[in-house]
Image (cartoon, rainbow, N blue to C red):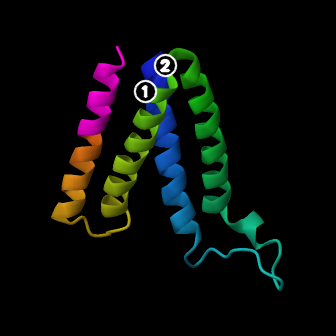
Amino acid sequence: MKWLVLLLGIAFNASASLLIKLALHPPFRLPSLTAPWAALENWPLLLGIFLYGSAFVLYAVALKFFPLNVAHPILTSGAIASVAVLSVVVLGEALRPAMVAGLGFIVLGVILLTTCAR
């Protein structure tokens, strides 16, 4: 159960980031002085905000089960790695070798943090 909370928090956070990025491009519009209600028609923006809020709640729940120095790095690094992969798969963004190496170091760091915290 506790690992499911962390995984859902990662998934919600990464999905929210992807949706916010999508919300910035046509046909979606952000609110402006001439169209203040445009955000209400921008479903990726609204869903992204909802998922960020849900990810925060899941993070708070995860803190009941894990120490802060374990939960935060796992959630943060998991979201970073997920966003990197999603941006390549969904948005067609580049993933350079140095970025892959950086993600590997992040994962290694989290593994070291979680094993040392036991």
Residue 33, by quadrant, is bottom right
Q: Secondary structure at mark 1?
A: helix
Q: Please provide percent x and percent y for residue 116.
A: 30, 21
The residue drawn where x is 52% and y is 16% is 65
Instruction: Depth check: give the residue in front, 65 or 23.
Output: 65
Which image quadrant is residue 108 in? top left
Asked if residue 32 is positioned above or below residue 103 in the image, the reply reads: below
Q: Which residues are magenta?
A: 108-118
Disc 1 designates what residue?
Answer: 70
Give the quarter of the image for residue 44.
bottom right
Give the amino acid at mark 2. Answer: Phe
Q: Which residue is mark 2?
A: 66
- Find residue 56 and report its horizontal and vertical position in percent: 62, 38
Q: Dot 2 lies on which element? A: loop
Left or right position of 30 against 35: left
- Of residue 118 and residue 59, the one placed in the foreground of this image is 118
Q: Answer above or below: position of 106 versus 68.
A: below
Residue at the image point whose x is 34% and y is 13% from the top: 118
